[in-house]
Amino acid sequence: MSMQLDKRSYAPGEVARLRIREDVDYRRRMLVSGPHGLKWHKVDGGRNYSVFAAKVKTSGTITVQMNNRITDVRQDTAQIDLSVLGTEAREVAGAAPFVAYSATSFFKSRVDSAPIDSAATAAFRSFMKSHPDQRSTAYPTIRGTGGNPWGMPFAMGTSTDPRWRITGAIPSQVSRLSSEGFPAPDWFGSTLTGTSDSPMVIIDRAAGRTIWAAKAKLAGSRTVQVGVAGYFEHTSNGLDQRNPRSDNKTNYRSRGCIPEAMVIRKDLVDYAIKTGGDLGHVLHMFLVETSSAAGFCHPMVGAESGKNGFGAEGLRLAIAPDVDVTSRGMSPEGVVVARTLQMRGCYLGDNSGSGSGIKAEQESPSHNVWGGRMPRDVLRGLTWNDFVVLPKGWQ
């Protein structure tokens, strides 16, 4: 089953049309719902397609369930994100936190049944044991907590938050950021790190996009000056426009890195602990050193130069499926991150300049995100021998 909306985003009150195609016989019944009780009505259809319409109000997720019309047995379920400008989905008590992009995106995909590249796995494990900056730490470390400034300044912005300006070297592909800015709480500026990369990620629920920038610094009241920027639209499949598998012509980020994959969010950790799940998305690994000669692969569209380590940028790793991550003596937070690395994996997205790690929401003295619950060594108990390498470009 495949789905497509007639537009990427809508104004409140506009009529959206959802076209659904199925590769099954005509004995099916479509149930379309969401977001938040929106009523969809079938307006067209044929033997292998249906068209539903609704007057939309808020952003959120549309769920389509296909049942056999005779037996009423479910045959398929799929989701697609709806973006209504100037609105965002209301957070329902007990509901899963917002995670962007379509259900079939690389970002949300799982690795449970993924094939393993045995030769690459052996080479990776050997490399991690021998690299001088990696030998002392046998697991990925967490950045941005406990006074470490190398995490990811992050905020979830809504239409009720203050508006921030973004200035500086903004690529032409995302030039609208110069005029539109982004919403974020007032505390956001205190988390900017001033490190050599000084990154930031904003999930803009009002505009339906996620913004990434680097070399970010305060340049006035609610103004951030950046050295580079990009954004991905939430209604897309979360891939850069230059990736042949992308379904969006405006998504743009240097080398194609997925913005949200670059941060461990506290709300997702808390929800996963409560439900016994994972973060719900792939993670971005800052590896000790990648290989420029190996180039890049899906989901990336470029690679850094001058690197002589292991693997193409975009190469996907995962904790092997036979590893019991609950038996390694890790805290609930560590188990959540480890379970994510096992169920969704991570891709090689950047060179760290030191040992390999993953960025968490950045703390600051006035914005204590984690309260000591996500220390640097939260994944102690894992080793690099627990990881396997997937074939290049696998999804």
Image (tube, helix red, strand yellow):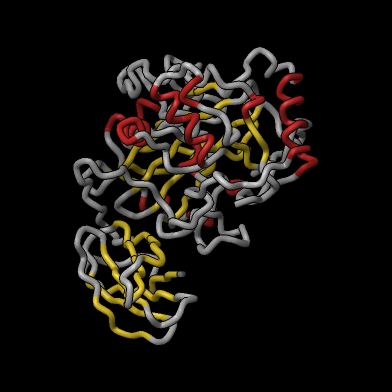
* 178 over 54 or under it: above or below: above
Q: Is residue 55 left or right of residue 2?
A: left
- Which residue occupies 30% across, 44% down? 96
Which quarter of the figure has residue 333?
Answer: top left
As drawn, the residue found furthest toward the top would be 136
Q: Is residue 105 left or right of residue 218?
A: right
- Which residue occupies 36% across, 73% down? 68
Q: Position of residue 365 (x, y in %)?
A: 34, 17
- Which residue occupies 35% across, 25% down? 190
- Which residue occupies 51% across, 37% down? 214
Is residue 356 visible in the rendered image? The answer is: yes
Q: Position of residue 349 (x, y in %)?
A: 61, 39
**Residue in front for this viewpoint, 33 or 83:** 33
Label total for image: 0
* 95 over 143 or under it: above or below: below
Q: Position of residue 192 (x, y in %)?
A: 42, 28
Which quarter of the figure has residue 321?
Answer: top right
- Which quadrant is home to the N terminus? bottom left
* 20 over 289 or under it: above or below: below
As drawn, the residue found furthest toward the front would be 71
Q: Position of residue 106 (x, y in %)?
A: 53, 51
**Residue in front for this viewpoint, 142 or 122:** 122
Which quarter of the figure has residue 75?
Answer: bottom left
Is residue 188 visible in the rendered image? The answer is: no
